[in-house]
Image (cartoon, grey):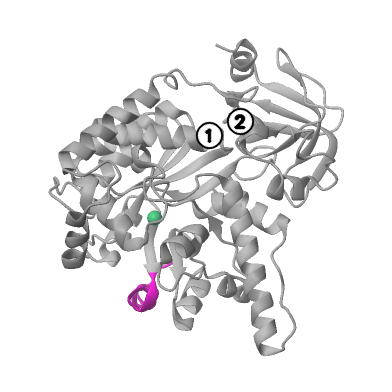
Amino acid sequence: VNTTAERIARHGAVFRGATIITGDPRLGIVIDGDLEVRDGIVAAVGTGLGTRGDEVEIDAGGTIIMPGFVDGHRHAWQGAFRRTLTDADLVRYLAATHAGTAPHYRPEDMYAGTVASLLGALDHGFTTVVDFSHNSRSSAHSDAALQASADAGIRVVHVSAPPNSGEWDHQWPDDLERVAAAASNAGGIVTVRAGIDMNRVEPAAGIIRRARGLGLGVHIDGVMGAASSLEIIELAGEGLLGPDVTLIHCTALSPEAWRAIRDAGTEVVLATVSDAHLGLAGGVPPVREIMALGLEPGLSVDVEVSLAGDPFTQMRSTALLQRMLAVADSHATGLPVGTLLGAADVLRFATSSSARTAGLGGVAGTLTPGRAADLLLVRPSGNTSMPVVDPVGTVVHGIDRSEIDAVLVAGRPLKWEGRLIHPHSDSLPGRLMASREHLIAAAGLPADLDDNRIRQYVSTHV
Ligand SMILES: [Zn+2]
């Protein structure tokens, strides 16, 4: 138990003397700045702030205070299989997870994987995760994922979606309304959206109409190629695209589909590393289209089964790939190099843009007074990150998890003095391994998931 962290959670705090990257275009970067957290929100940002009542005074000299990162989408239920398939392609990923272990998940496996992935996200500096939970095999599975979200304490956008394979209760999408009510009755910071992936229990149009009827936004995963392009144009024609619909990946879409996305104000979340590493529909993240249309995408981790789970990999990979493609295009055509993504761009994508694509625009993503106190205290290491001349460049290209000293979500410290504060973090590894062993045994798979049986399944089913 950390008493300072507890006092901050209860009474609020004033952090003094930090370099504050507000992420708010009107406030910019405040040097030697103070930030007041009160009642879960950013109460004030400036210099020489006073203190009200019993707020905790924190000397934040030498730190960078910035908005927490927002993961635009991941599948937290797969947490027990992190980095099991680091060299996988899309087919092998689908085989091992959706066709292999997913049908054998019990609610407690949903809980263990989800809480592990969410706590890892917190440690990496994410204050919000869009958890695309597409293994909702029963109501109890959804409830377990919601419980894990509440227990982790991080802000979660729970995207409720049916499983992609195997036997299940077929309670979805009827169960959506109950899931949304359960999250809202819990009174916490978990919100719910509807998720559409490979298993179309009904056409996307029906799900979007149903979600809108419940006041829920929609995330569509696996958006890629010709079939998705046609679907996007069709949905646009029916008035079913819009800012409440978020499309994930968006690789190899037609120019017509991109125009429909732009015209409808539909949100786009990149999964840069996932696209390129797993090879989704050509493997080129749509950074050219994003730049050409002037879109502001979110960034996302996607599958920890194969990929890194931190925000720095997302920001660096997105900047790297965009710059590489722009220079390569110029070299091939002889035309001038177009606009290049900079550190400030990808930092914005990873914070305020990702928050907006998650349905949290105006709620999180910047340190604007009145918004949620979802923030990081970064303590740049003397050995690896000094001198800090450009704090944005330092945050994007320099720091790592070990330099994230504190993570606050809704004003509550969940990481403090470099360590996660969580009642279950000690018992978690054991719980996770027990879940993993059950799933491997139930699926009849070897521990490395390298099995001809799942390859055969893929060749006939996927
Ligand atoms: Zn995904």
Q: Give the quadrant of residue 192.
A: top left
Residue at the image position 41 percent from the left and 61 percent from the top: 278
x then y, percent, for residue 17: 83, 29
The type of residue carrying mark 1 is Leu
On whether residue 75 falls in the magenta region, the answer is no
Q: Secondary structure at mark 1?
A: helix
Split into 4 quadrants, where in the image is the C terminus?
Answer: bottom left
Where does ligand 1 appear, by image quarter?
bottom left
Q: Which residue is mark 1?
A: 122
Which three-letter amino acid code belongs to the residue tagged 2? Val
Main SS, magenta residues? helix
Give the crowd class for mark 2: few <14, some 14-19, many >=20 residues within 10 Å: many
Chain part drawn in magenta: 224-241
Residue under label 2: 407
Q: CA distance from mark 2 to mark 1?
A: 7 Å
**Residue 155 can be seen, yes or no:** yes
- Residue 267, percent from left and from top: 50, 62
Q: Nearer the viewer, residue 452 or 81?
A: 452
